[in-house]
Amino acid sequence: MSTKVIGRRLLWLMLACLLSVNLVVGAKLATQPEKPKDSIDVAFEKMRLLTNVLLEIRKSYVDEEKTEYKELLYGALRGMLQSLDPHSQFMDPDMFKDMKNDTAGEFGGLGIVIGLRDGILTVIAPMEDTPAFRAGVLHSDKIVAIDGESTENMSLQDAVKRMRGEPGTKVKIKIIRPKPQAIKELELVRAIIKVDSVKGAVILEDHIGYIRITQFNEPTSDTLQKAINKLMGEGMTALVLDLRNNPGGLLSSAVDVSQQFVKSGSVIVSTKGRKGSGGQYQYVSKGKAHYLNFPMVVLVNGGSASASEITAGALQDHHRAIIVGEKTFGKGSVQSVLPLEDGSAIRLTTAKYYTPSGRTIHEKGVEPDIVIPMLPEQWRKVQIKRSRDEVGDVDEEELKTDSESLAARGEPAIDVQLERAVDVLKGIRLFQSQIRSGQVAKKK
């Protein structure tokens, strides 16, 4: 069979592969408008270059074992998706399986949620009670090497794949910490990461409740509702919802959580895709449980991303909660997952999130109503104290901190952001009490 015939068949095979994907996860998309009749011909013509390169690699590349069509095609798809934006990616069958396990709430790895910021592999947030958290990894740390290999020009999916592995095995990462400037080399032991998304449900003081959401996954909304009902049974009359260092998760979970605090029929978030694509959709509050009668504060910081930003933005726009803390990460794009016939999939950015008032989240984040900054070391110490209070005895060796950290200097772990949230709620209740008293006096 001639090279020309092989090339033609390969072209049609690649076109069929690219056109056979089916949308199963992500934003609900309308039927695409009909393409011009010559679009397939144009695609065939433009892909001829790619086919010729594939054939040349197969014919001439020095290491023949690296020239299997499957590996070459996977490599081309990785590069193609990576060139679009940091969140679009090609997932081989193993990665696609790992992604589905992530959203179910349990997976193997280090417990680091990462992204690309200015082309550099950056920690969005370490998950609580994980190897990364115990080793002292912080939000905004830059991962510059994994097992001695530089992450420069390394794709996001390759970095994730390198850091995951069998529980009990080790991986070394090198990080650069911007503030205070430091370079650290850490050896972490992989573990099964179990994500308990709702934690720390307690009454703090003066009937003010506190609940922390660490990630938005499938059971989050139901677990949150149980926690709220528990605190209300204990006399809660105000709530602090802590979304700090929450890297996000499922859009559906963010909608389910948000709708518990706003009236039925209220817009939670909208998505807008490319003009003419039909990729526009509004998510509105439904459900039966709507907690509207107590004041709220939502805590956020730079590690609050994606689903956290949707929730914070919705409650802020509906004037349901006061947002306290620091500006959020700014990850506000919609990724649709399209599976391929061989078990692999592509994650493609198809739209962007907008808050109910029409504000964009992507690359801008959510600005708090009350800005309360916190030094990374102070935040780290607050996290350590919180883990010790919740878990009990904690191995001090596992909770390493910088030699120049607040912990080393013996300074107390004061959560200034939480303290301000409590003060705000006390002030709101005092104001409401005075209004009620004034109304009664006026009637008399």
Image (cartoon, grey):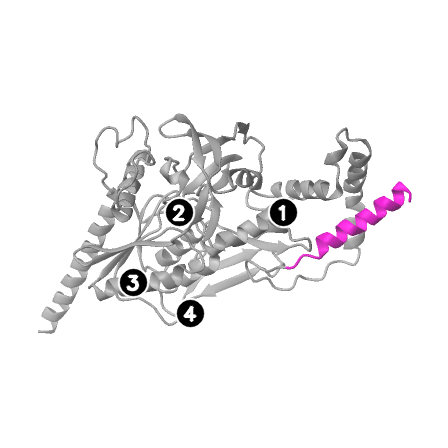
Dot placed on the residue nearer the N-terminal end, 3 or 4: 3
Left or right of 237 in this view: 312: right
Count neighbours of disc 4 (C-alpha within 10 A) and say few if under 14, some if 14 to 19, many if 20 or more: some
Could you tell me residue 189's position as x and y percent?
44, 37
Q: Which span is picked out in magenta? A: 1-22
Q: Residue at label 3?
A: 228
Identify which amino acid the numbered label 4 is placed on: Lys
The front one of 115 and 184 is: 184
**Residue 14, position as x, y percentages in the image:** 76, 49
Estimate the spatial distance between the alpha carbons at disc 4 and disc 1, rounded to whole Å: 36 Å
In the rendered structure, find residue 92 and report the number of the disc placed on it: 1
Q: Callout 1, which amino acid? A: Asp
Q: Are marks 2 and 4 in contact (CB under 8 Å)?
A: no
Q: Which of marks 3 and 4 is in front?
A: 3
User: According to the image, label 2 marks what residue?
Assistant: 304
Which of the 4 image quadrants contains residue 273?
A: bottom right
Q: What residue type is labelled 3?
A: Ile
